[in-house]
Image (cartoon, rainbow, N blue to C red):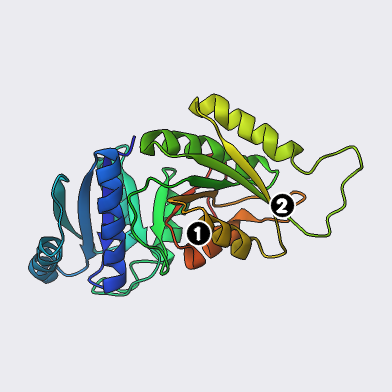
Amino acid sequence: MVEQLIVPVDGSHESWNAFDVALALARACDGSIEVVEVVADPGDMTVALKTMKERIAETDTSGVQVGTSVEVTSSDVVSALAAVLERNEGATFVMGSHGRGRSAALLGSVASDLLRTTYGPMVVVGPEAQPSDFSGPVVVTVDGSELSESAVGLAAAWSIELGSEPWIVQVLEPDLVLPPDVAESVYISRVAHQLTSMSGRPVQAEVLHGRHPVEVVTKYAKSIGASLIVAGTHGRTGASRLTLGSTAAGFVKHGTCPVLLIRPPHFPAV
């Protein structure tokens, strides 16, 4: 599944953090990496390629095929990267959430725009994320909505690929009052059962409590040594009041592991 990883860089240190994460992910999944930089001036191609090759040479890439390419565009970075993905069907972007280099603001807003224009999953590396061997759990957050549950299948597929343990997490407010005959774990247990059926392996489920889902989930993911947090980019709140649009960005900003994001195909681009 994770056979080819595309890492957009822009010459900044922050953008190369994603390369280190992609390298670890490629080793875990026996995949390859293509490092891509987008430039507006053809005269920048030589410098861009030289910089990429020098940076890659500083890293132990043994066992992983790593290629480099430079895209020249007179339009916009998003369109150029979307075209790269189209030429490499089935590839997955791994990119940083912050960075500003030769191609201006390549990261951050570009990651958001790519999620609006492409339907494949994207691994986003936030400022606090650290590379790991991806042997830790895969945490997927749900909020009671169909849109948030669309990420469950993705979490199942990636946990199988990584050989890791999937965890389903729901955040409830501390003062939430449920009917006496309804256990707070009913919903999340059902989702965990569905994920067990998808993955063919045991799934852990945990109900967390707190008023700030980003803080609660990222702290919990760190405590169990999670390799990934998986979330849909949009979601309506259920009992947990977890909105996965803005919250997904919070996971990226504050999480100590990368975040695997997906926009459900039936959700309109905005």
Which residue appears at 50% of the width and 28% of the height?
Answer: 201
Q: Is residue 131 above or below residue 102?
A: above
Q: Position of residue 97 (x, y in %)?
A: 40, 65
Can the viewer see residue 83 in this picture?
A: no
Q: Is residue 259 above or below residue 120?
A: below
Q: Amino acid at mark 1?
A: Lys
Give the CA distance from mark 1 to mark 2: 24 Å
Can the viewer see residue 165 in this picture?
A: yes
Foreground pick, 141 / 82: 141
Which residue appears at 13% of the width and 70% of the height?
Answer: 44
Residue 186 appears left or right of 147: right
Mark number for residue 222? 1
Foreground pick, 114 / 58: 58
**Quadrant in which the C terminus appears:** bottom right
Mark number for residue 196? none
Foreground pick, 37 / 56: 56
Return the residue at label 2.
237
Q: Is residue 157 above or below residue 137?
A: above
Q: Position of residue 34 (x, y in %)?
A: 20, 50
Q: Quadrant of residue 90?
A: top left
- Which of the two labelled residues, at mark 1 and mark 2, occupies the earlier sequence position? 1
The crowding category of the residue bearing disc 2, from other C-alpha atoms within 10 Å (few below 14, some 14 to 19, many at least 20), is some
Q: Position of residue 215 (x, y in %)?
A: 60, 65
Q: Position of residue 232 (x, y in %)?
A: 55, 48
